[in-house]
Structure formats: structure tokens, C-alpha cells
Image (tube, helix red, strand yellow):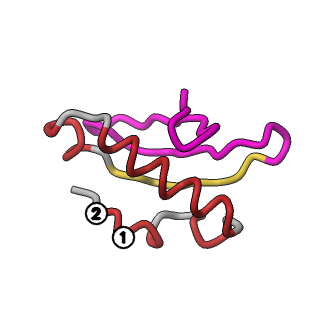
Amino acid sequence: MFNIKDIETIKGYSKLNDKSKILFKTFLINFMDAQGTNSRETIVPISVKFVKADSYLRFDYKRYGRKGWLHVAGARTWY
């Protein structure tokens, strides 16, 4: 299970600016809290990057062994 203390190990995290790091950490806490216990245990963060053209963070992850990704527009806004 992913621990928020390990956020710095996510690929691309170190390349984010300070504002994006704060946004991503807050988002990740909210995202994990929004998941059920069983689902939360299967989420494996892969990478994060800032998409300049559209000003959002792209968060790639695995859940139940399948890859997925989200647009992170805010700490409580993702799709």
C-alpha cells in the first residue's frame, strides 16, 4: 500500500515546482481518502507531470493491475 511519506519516490515529483508539489500532495491525500479501503490498497502511483499547455497535472497510476491516469485540476478536482 502506498504511503504519502513516499511521495518523493513518484517519478516526476522532483521536477515539479513548489506550488505543484503542494497541489499534488494535497490532491493525493484527498484522492486516497475518497477511495474505499480495498481499492486504496491496490493503487500504485507511477508518475506525475505538469502539462504546460493546459495547466494541469497528469497523474499516472495502477489500480487492480491496470494503468490509468487523471487530470489533476485542483486539490479536490480531478477527472
Residue at image point 49% right, 47% down: 27
Q: Is residue 73 magenta?
A: yes
Q: Are marks 1 and 2 in contact (CB under 8 Å)?
A: yes
Amino acid type of disc 1?
Asp
Amino acid at the residue labelled 2: Asn
Give residue 73's position: percent from left, percent from top.
Answer: 64, 37
- Which quadrant holds the C terminus? top right
**Residue 29 x, y percent position in the rendering:** 38, 51
Q: In the drawing, what numbered circle is on residue 3?
A: 2
Q: Which residues are magenta?
A: 52-79
Q: How many marks?
A: 2
Give the x, y percent position of residue 59.
Answer: 54, 45
Dominant secondary structure of the residues highlighted in magenta in the image: strand
| Quadrant in which the N terminus appears | bottom left
Residue drawn at point x = 85 percent, y = 41 percent: 53
Q: Is residue 74 left or right of residue 4?
A: right
The image shows residue 15, relative to residue 63, as above or below, that is below
Establish if 48 lies above or below 4: above
Q: Label 1 belongs to which residue?
A: 6
Mark 1 lies on a secondary structure that is helix
* Circle 2 Cα neighbour tier, 10 Å, few/some/many (<14 / 14–19 / ≥20): few
Residue 21 magenta-highlighted: no
Asked if 66 appears above or below 16 in the picture, the reply is above
Camera-side residue: 57 or 29? 29
Q: In this rendering, would 36 be left or right of 19?
A: left
